[in-house]
Structures are given as C-alpha cells and as structure tokens.
Image: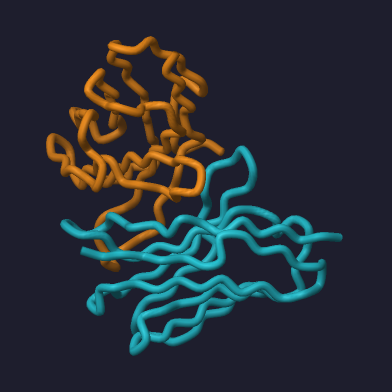
Chain colours: A cyan, B orange
Amino acid sequence: GENVEQHPSTLSVQEGDSAVIKCTYSDSASNYFPWYKQELGKRPQLIIDIRSNVGEKKDQRIAVTLNKTAKHFSLHITETQPEDSAVYFCAAPGRGSQGNLIFGKGTKLSVKP
Amino acid sequence: DGGITQSPKYLFRKEGQNVTLSCEQNLNHDAMYWYRQDPGQGLRLIYYSQIVNDFQKGDIAEGYSVSREKKESFPLTVTSAQKNPTAFYLCASSIVGGPSYNEQFFGPGTRLTVL
C-alpha cells in the first residue's frame, strides 16, 4: 500500500522568507496530491492540490511541485506571514476504493514576525 | 463553518464503555470518512463510506465500528476493545464522481478522553 513521508516535522522561518515542505510517496500509480492546513484548534482545510498530469501548480503565494520520477512533491510558501503559522499535511491516495487518502505526519510551521 | 458538523466537541468516557461520536453533513456528499489525530501522527483513517449502507475499514479500524444508514450521517462508535481511545477524532466528506479524488471537507472534531 501507499506510504507517505513528510519532512521536516517542524520549520521556523522569519516573516518574508520562503518555506518548503517535502513529501515522498511509494506507489508510482498515485495521481493526486493535496496539501491541507490546520490552524491551532481548527479543522484541516485544503489549500492546494496537484494531479499527476502537471508538474507545478501555483495559487498566489503557494505552489506545489511534483516529481513523478523521484516520487516526491513539495509545498512552497513565499513571502511568509504570521498567519501562515499552522500544521501542514500532505496526502496521497490510499488503498482500496477511490477517494480515501493517506496523510503525512504533518509539519508545524512557525513564522516569526 | 456549516456543512459538516460533529458532536459533542468534548467527550469523556470511562474505561470499558462504548461511546458514539456523531457526524452530520448537509453538503449532499456521497463519501464520508473518519480519522483519528494524535500528536505527531498526522491523520489516520479509521473507516470510510462511499455510499449509503456500505463502508470499508481504513488503516486502524480495530476497536471501532460505523454505520451509514443515511447519506447525511456517519456515526462512529468507539468500543471497549479499542486499547487507546484517547484522541482527537475528525470526520470528513467529499463528492464522488468527476476526478478520481476530490477535496475532503472536515468537521470541527471531537476530543475523546478516557478516564
């Protein structure tokens, strides 16, 4: 089955710097890779996702890149702001029926003003 | 933050007791999911359901049971067989159809503590 590894587990950056979080997956057939953001005490929310037919997707300060050969995908946040502080989770398709996901263990991002 | 709700927000249980967590959605989503969240462990899938009256075990189903009698509801029962039930439980839902995978919308969660 699928296995998702996420690094780093914690990341601290200065406001305005960039942050990069990387995930690797094991199943070469996987074709969907979402990123969720969970602020303290709140529910996870999708911030960006990418399907395997593209190598990069951008949405304002957030981008995701996918390297299918190496089986890894990364979240890039530019010009970080204090409100970017949260736990970020990557995910990849799980076993069985369509729809279920396997999540990474999360990265706690702290943006220092 | 409407759409998918969970109750209660906090739940305390004595050892040896079963307890049921509620999850309701009014998004007309076919698929629903239950996750367990522990510190440093991410989200681990307990059970999921793609359609009414059908559900599948996730990665950590032992000690849990579910039902899906209505499209809107997917209750989770934590049984006394679950060895370490203290955790934060998240319910989610998504549409089925179109792309193979779609955004999952999460509820606010239930924090279960076993005393």
Left or right: residue A16 versus residue B58 is right
Q: Nearer the viewer, residue B95 or B48?
A: B48
Residue B85 on image: x %, y %: 36, 27
Left or right: residue B85 versus residue B100 is right
For the C terminus of chain A, the image quarter is bottom right
Left or right: residue B67 versus residue B74 is left
Q: Identify the residue at image location x=29%, y=24%.
A: B78
Outermost right residue: A113
Q: In this view, does B59 lie above or below A57?
A: above
Q: Which of A40 and A47 is in front in this view?
A: A40
Say if residue A59 shows up in the picture. no
Residue A105 on image: x %, y %: 46, 55
For the N terminus of chain A, the image quarter is bottom left
Q: Residue A34 lies in what quarter of the image? A: bottom left
Q: Residue B112 lies in what quarter of the image? A: top left
Say if residue B36 shows up in the picture. yes
Q: Identify the residue at image location x=24%, y=43%.
A: B48
Residue B83 on image: x %, y %: 29, 27
Outermost left residue: B53
Outermost bottom residue: A69
Q: Is residue A109 above or below residue B57?
A: below
Total tally of numbered discs in the picture: 0
Residue B36 on image: x %, y %: 38, 39
Q: In this view, does B98 lie above or below B114?
A: below
Q: In this view, does B3 lie above or below B18?
A: below
